[in-house]
Image (cartoon, grey):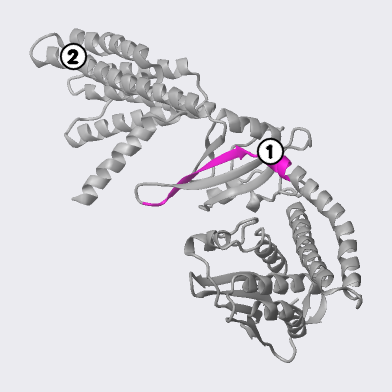
Amino acid sequence: MPREGGTGRSWAAALRGVLLASTVDPRAIQGGFVLLVGVDVVLRLVGGVRPGLSLPAVAVLVAVLLLLVTVVARGRLPARAVGAMLVVDIGVVGLARLAPDGGSGLVAVLPALWLGRLHGRRGAVVTAVAAVALVTVPGLLYTGPEGINLSRSVIIPVVATIASLAVAGGMEQVEHQRRVSAATLDTVDVGLVLLDEHGRYVAVNRRHADFMALAYPAGHAGRAGQLGLVYDVDRVTRLGRESMPTYRAARGEEFDDCRIWVGEDPMTQRALSVSARSVLDEAGRFGGAALAYKDVTDLMRAMEVKDEFVASVSHELRTPLTSIVGYVQMLREDDTLTTQTARQLEVVDRNAHRLLRLITDLLDTAQIEAGPVGMRRTPCDLSALVSSCADAARPAYRAAGIGLEVAVPDALPMLLDRQRIEQVVDNLLTNAMKYSAAGTVVRVGLAVEDGRAELTVVDRGIGISAADRDRLFTRFFRSRDAEDRSIQGVGLGLSITREIVEAHGGRVEVDSELGVGSTFRVRLPMAG
C-alpha cells in the first residue's frame, strides 16, 4: 500500500509540475493531446470499430498535422498561436464525434486545462465558447437532441469549462504567491540563488543580479561554475571552475562564509560571503541547492585599514621599545646599583619584555591577515630546537615554581622555518606555564608518528571547557576561566601558532578537561 500511495503522489507531482511549468513547450502540449487521441482510437479498434476514411479519422490527421507544425517550429510559437492550436484541438474533438462510433468528448478536457493554464479566466471563457460552438452544436445537429445525446453534448462543455476554471484559479494563486515571494526576496539585502539538480539557475533575486552584473559583464549562461570576474580573497587570483561556490553547491557541498571578490575595477569591486545548503527531495536525494551572497565589502575594507593601522603602530612602537629593553639590560649589569634600584629595573625589564611580546604578536597577526604566512625553510634539528626553547623557558618556570620535563630524540632533522617554529614552541610553553599552578609539572615530548613529527606539551593546569575549546584558536579569544583568574594575555599566541603550523602543512590539536589539564599536539609532515 505505501508503494501505491507513493506512486500516486509521484504522478500527481508530475502532472502538477507539467501544468505549473514556467516554460510551456507547444510540442509537449500537442504531443500529449495526440497521445490521448491515439489511445482513444486504439481502444475503439479493440472494441470492434472498423477503421476507414471518416470524420474521426480526419480529426486524428488534423491533430497529427498540428503536432508536425509545432515540431517544425521547434516549439517556438507565440502564446496566441498556442491558444489557437488548443481551440482547434477542441474542434478536433467535435469533429471526431460526428460519427456513430465517434471519439470520446472527454478528450476535450486536456486542451481546456491548457487554455486555463496559459490564459487564465479568459482561457476558460474561450474553452466554454469553443466547446459549445465546436462540440455541442455540431453534435446536436448531427445526432439530434434525442435521448442521451442531449446530455452528452451539454455535459462536455460544462466539464471542460469547470476544468479550465479550476486550473485558471490555481494558476492565479500560484502567480500571486510568486509575485509576493519575488517582492519579498527582492527586498532582502542578500543575493539569493536557487539551483536545480543539474546545476541550472532556477531563480535569482534582484540583489544577486547586481552582483552578477559585476562578475559577468558579458552575460551569464545560467549554469553553475561559469567562470568570470570572480577572485579569491587576495583579490588577484581568479577562481577556477571547481572553486566556484555555485559549482561546489551543485555537487552537493554545504559551506558557510566562503569569501570571494567580484568585479574587475577596484573602485566597484565587491567582497561577498557565500553560504550554501543542499535541497533534498522526498526520497532524500539531491534536488538542487540554495546559495546566499552577503556583501561584506565594508567589513573587509575596515579590516584592511585596521590591519594596516595595527602593523604601522606596532612597528613604530617596537623600535623604541627594543632600545629601552637593551638599555635596561645594560643598567642591570651595573654592579654599583643599590638593591632597591635593581628591583625597580627588574620590574621595568619584565614589563618592557611583556609589552615587546604583545607588539610582536600584533605585528604577526597583521601579517597573517594580509595573506598566507610566508615560510623560509632551512634544514634544522627539531630536537635541538625544542631543547633550546625549553632551556630558555626554565628560569621563568623555576620562578613560578613549575617543573619542566623534556623528552626528545637525539636528533630529528627537518626542513622548517626555524624562527617560526621557535615561536610555536615558545607560545606553547608560555601558555602551559600561565595556566599551571605552582608545584605541577609541564611535560614536553617529541616523537615521529605515521611519517609526522609530533610535538606534545602536557600541563596539569586549569584546563579548558568544552564550550571554549572550539574557539580556542580564534584571535583575541580568552576563556572565561582565564579572565576570572586575571591571567595575563590578549589571546593571540594560539591563533598565531595555528597559522604557522598550517603554513608548514601541519595541524595543531588540543585535548583538555576542565580542572585536569590540557595536552597540545603539533603534527608536522616530515617530507619537505
Element under disc 1 = helix
Question: Can residue 185 be seen from the camera position used here?
Answer: yes
Q: Is residue 54 left or right of residue 416?
A: left
Residue found 25% across the figure and 29% down from its top: 51
Question: Can residue 103 be seen from the camera position used here?
Answer: no
Element under disc 2 = helix
Q: Quadrant of the C terminus?
A: bottom right
> Which residue is under mark 1?
297
Percent position of residue 436, x then y:
59, 74
The answer for how far apart the CA atoms under marks 2 and 1 are is 68 Å
The numbered mark at residue 153 is 2
> Is 156 rendered above or below residue 352?
above
User: In front here: 303 or 283?
Assistant: 303
Percent position of residue 198, x then y:
51, 45
Q: Which residues are magenta?
A: 284-303
Q: How many discs mark residues in the rendered view? A: 2
The numbered mark at residue 402 is none
Say whether residue 523 is magenta: no
Give the mark toward the camera: 2 or 1.
Answer: 1
Could you say which quadrant of the image residue 508 lies in? bottom right
* Marked residue nearer the N-terminal end (2 or 1): 2
Circle 1: residue type:
Thr
